[in-house]
Image (cartoon, coloured by chain):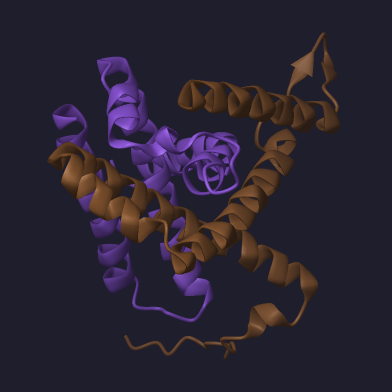
Amino acid sequence: MSRRPYKRELQKTWWLRQPRYVRYMMREMSAFFIGVYVLILIIALSQLAQGEAAYNAFLAIATGPAETGFAFVTLIFAIYHSYTWFQVTPKAMPLMLGGKPVPGAFIIGAHWFGFAVLSVALWLLVGS
Amino acid sequence: MASSNKPVIWALFAAGGTAAAFLLPMLIMITCFAVPLGLLPAETLSYEHVSELLQHPLGKLVTFGVLFVIIWHAAHRVRITAHDLGIHRDTLVMTVCYGIAALGSLIALVALPAI
């Protein structure tokens, strides 16, 4: 039995047609930058394990202007990822308290509060 | 019973997305901008200081866990996004994405105990 299912042609630039689609694609693209950043962190750990000379050679490359530019773009995407991730939490895990649904803004706010606490903790831990 | 790897991938995806959402903005700030901006001393990223931070086994474990779930989150999302961008060779895309995530996980697993 041969079937030739209808395939609707989709232009590769479909996501530029509407701001909503662009926001969706930016959210998805955050993963590329996040992935590359984490991969670089893993390389840093591997260089660290190999000794001081290897780690310093890595640092010299990783702190260049192009790398800092990449880091800046990654920071913007990472913040956007946090925003979009927290924004869907009321839908991903709706909460009931005393038989009443907890307002979405409260769930999102609690996540941002956790974000602030963890960020300060990370800063103090690494900066000390 | 039909078996599927989807629940495993989804759990990793959710854990990684959550870890990234909570930790990455500050981690990027610390590793890439705090020192050049003069907010933290230059020694923050030095060999001695970073090695010292990663001495405790619990610290190594948490570091590994965070990197592991985030890299699998990113690999999965990039795989799905490739489809949205019109790249339909999913077997190839999947092999590359999950292959890089697996290799990264392995490097972290080998490197961390050696620090």
Query: Dividing the image into 4 quarters, which one contains the C terminus of chain B?
Result: top left
Q: Nearer the viewer, residue B64 or B39?
A: B39
Pinpoint residue B25: horizontal percent, then vertical percent.
Answer: 58, 43
Q: Tell me where residue B61 appears, x and y as whole percent.
A: 30, 23
Picture quarter containing residue A14? bottom right
Which one is in front, A42 or A126?
Answer: A126
Residue A37 at what x, y percent from top left? Answer: 42, 53
Q: Give the answer, above or below, for where A58 lies relative to A69.
A: above
B34 lies left or right of B31? right
The colour chain B appears in is purple
- In front of the other: B13 or A116: A116
Q: Quadrant of residue A117?
A: top right
Residue B34: x %, y % from top left? 56, 42
**Residue located at (45% from left, 44% from top):** B13
The reply to whether residue B3 is in sight is no
Question: Is residue B17 placed above or below A64 in the rendered structure?
Answer: above
Q: Colour of chain A?
A: brown
On screen, residue A110 versus residue B16, left or right, reads: right
Check the image and report above or below for A10 versus B3.
Answer: below
